[in-house]
Structures are given as C-alpha cells and as structure tokens.
Amino acid sequence: MPHWWRNLCLLPQAAHSESDNSDELTSAETDAKVAFINEMTTPQLAHTGIPADFSDFERSLVEKSEIALVDGLQLERWTRDPNRKIDQHLLSLNRDYKLDNKAYGYLADVTISGRELTALGARQEVEFGKIPQGLDAQQVLKDYVLRRFMNSSHWVYPDGDPGGFTFKQMLYCTASGEYGRYPEYQLGEVQDWNLMGPKYRWSLFTCYLHDFMVYLGPVKHVFKEAVAVVQSPDFVHVVPNPKPGYQLEVAIGYPFIDYAPIPNYFGFGPGKFNWAVKTFSFLLRDNNEVECVMDFVAGARPKKVLDFGSMIPDPLYGTAGALQFLSLGIFNPQGFHDFVDLQMSTQHSRVHQALMEGSAKVFATWVADQAQKSGSGAA
C-alpha cells in the first residue's frame, strides 16, 4: 500500500450515516482528511500489498485509482456544498421523457489539492417514483440505492439496442490494504455499497454507457462509450431529514480514473479529464415520493471538442482561435466556447436522463413486488 494512502486510511473515516441536524454535509473527520490531502505532494506508488503477478498495466490502475480517490473526495464534497459558486444554465434536452425533470449545465472554478482549475458540470433533478404506503420507505430506499440500483440499471429497447449501464469489475483494495483482481464469476456486477468500508477500501470497475447516441434526422447513431470509476465508502451518504419536507437522503458517487476503456476521439471524455466525479442523491419526501438529484463535474474545461492528436487542430475550438487571431482579437471566442461546452453538458444529461427513465421502471416494478409480498398493496 502506498505510504501516503496508508496515512490517509489512518485518519477517522467519514460515517455512512450523517446527523440530521448538521447544516454542513462535510463532517469533522472529512475536514481533517481533506486538510491532510491538501498538504500532500504528488503521491508516489509503493508496491506493498500488490500481488507479484500484477501486470504493469494493473499496477498503473491501482495508482490511478488511489489518485482519483484523493482528488475525487474533495470534488464530491464541493458538489455537496450548498454555498458553492457556479454559473448555471437551464438546458433543453430536446427529447421526450416520461419523468418530470430539469437539467442544468454549469461552469465553475474549483480548487483541488491547492490547484484551481476551470470545471464543466451538469446537474439534474428527476421525479423518480413513489414507495407504497405500508412499507418501511426508508429501508426500501436504502436497499434499492445501495444494493440494487446500479446492478439493475440495464434493459433492452424494442429496437433491440441495449440501454442503461452495464459493468465489468476490474481490481479492488480490501479494508486491510491488500490488492486483488476479481474472479471471472464476479465480473458482471458491482459491489454492494454496504461492503465499502467493512470489506473493501475501494473497488474499480468499468461502466459501459449504452445511451450515448445522437440523432441525424430519423437515423440514430450509438457511440460505444465506457468510463473507469471507483467505489469507495467516502462517497456514500445516508442522511436523515436532510431538509424540510424530506425524511431521508441516500447518496452514492464515484470518481473517474485517468483511463479510457474504449479509445475515443472526444476532447472531453474518458481519459481526458484532470479529475471528474458523478453523484446520485436519492431523496425521500415525507409523502414517500422519491426524487433523484444527479451531479457531474469534471475539469479542466475542454480545450478541444474532437481530439485527433497533438498535430491536428480541433475543427471547432481551433477555428474559433484562428478567427480571434485573424480579427486581431476583435472576435472573442469565449462565448462560443461556453455554448459548446454546455452542449457537452446537455449530451451528458441525455445519457443520464435515459438511465433514470429505465431505472424508474425497474424501481416501480420492484417496490410493487415488495408491497405485494408484505401485503400492503399499492398506495
């Protein structure tokens, strides 16, 4: 285990369950952890605890995972700060959805480990469903989010195309600091979030996004897209009475590592982020309705829309830069950059709204089955 990560693990761990009368979502333990992080220099990987048969590639994934967790923890806490400063814009997803939703793109400056970078984000509010009366609504929501949500988030559309997310487990670090790779029979599902902390320090997996598509008239083109992300106990929050009108929040999230499972030509995407994090906050209202608030933020803001290599300029931002040069600075490309960046937020939001649309159906079927088994019926 790296010496810097071992020292980090010795700090008090942020509890999964958080006080219902705390206005600040960052605990004292987390403040201490972040202060420790900010004092660190660039971590160097020590090979203690890594199996001898790990390849150089697997060793690099271990290092990338641990670095992503350090940066991602700070970034995730920033997303939960109600006083953060962002330049937010309402997005139009231009698609028909069953669930009531709002999507926002935002631009911001974020300081991670003492370094300030520009950031691009997307925040979504989705009316997800309702838990029938007669069930223990809080326990049902915890069971769904921590055990079922991710592993049930896939389906097949009528045209035969897959939808939602599918997964492939990669590597893990146990609570005692031993690294390993998953056996074949465990590759297809991510870990129960309840095991993060008691059994695992972290778990690395590939997430395949099946709704990354564009429409050219009536023609649909689906891109093969995947990200490598890390489960960790520090990204789990169970908060009673998080705000007036709500009885419980159950939240999960994961940072992205610096690796693209599927090579791509996007200037802003897997393998192109300095750091990035995705969060899912499921909020249970007093009337048992469930709202899901999603947040995604990555930095630094893209310098390219399409990345064909260092010798080929980006056709969009490169052209805007050329116009600025040719106009002797009269043309300012910043407005164009902001517009295009927010289109990237729009595409991200479409992918995750599609995830919510399918997952809400799975959730409704599951809670109805739970109600039938308990004899409570529907609300």
Image: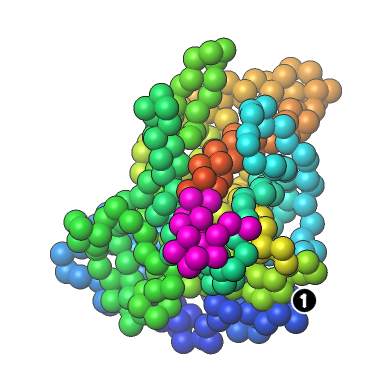
Q: Quadrant of the C terminus?
A: bottom right
Report the residue at 75% width, 82% height from top.
21
Residue that mark 1 sits on: 23
Report the residue at 42% width, 27% height from top.
158
Report the residue at 36% width, 38% height from top.
262
x, y percent for residue 153? 44, 48
Scheme of colours in the image: rainbow
Query: In the image, is residue 176 above or below residue 259?
Result: below
**Tag 1: Cα neighbours inside 10 Å, few (<14), some, or many (≥20)?**
few
Horizontal side, residue 136 vs residue 334: left or right: left
Of the pair 208 and 276, the residue shown nearer to us: 208
Of the pair 3 and 206, the residue shown nearer to us: 206
Of the pair 309 and 103, the residue shown nearer to us: 103
- Residue placed farthest to the left in the image? 53
Report the residue at 48% width, 80% height from top.
8
x, y percent for residue 260? 40, 44
Judge whether residue 116 can be spotted in this image.
no
* Segment colored magenta: 364-379
Q: Quadrant of the N terminus?
A: bottom left
What secondary structure is the magenta-colored segment mainly? helix
Query: Is 370 within the magenta?
Result: yes
Question: Which quarter of the figure has residue 200?
Answer: bottom left
Query: In the image, is residue 332 above or below residue 122?
Result: above
Local secondary structure at mark 1 = loop
Judge whether residue 133 can be spotted in this image.
yes
Q: Amino acid at mark 1?
A: Asp
x, y percent for residue 13? 52, 83
- Residue placed farthest to the top in the image? 217
x, y percent for residue 73? 56, 67
Query: Is 184 within the magenta?
Result: no
Question: Which quarter of the figure has residue 150?
Answer: bottom left
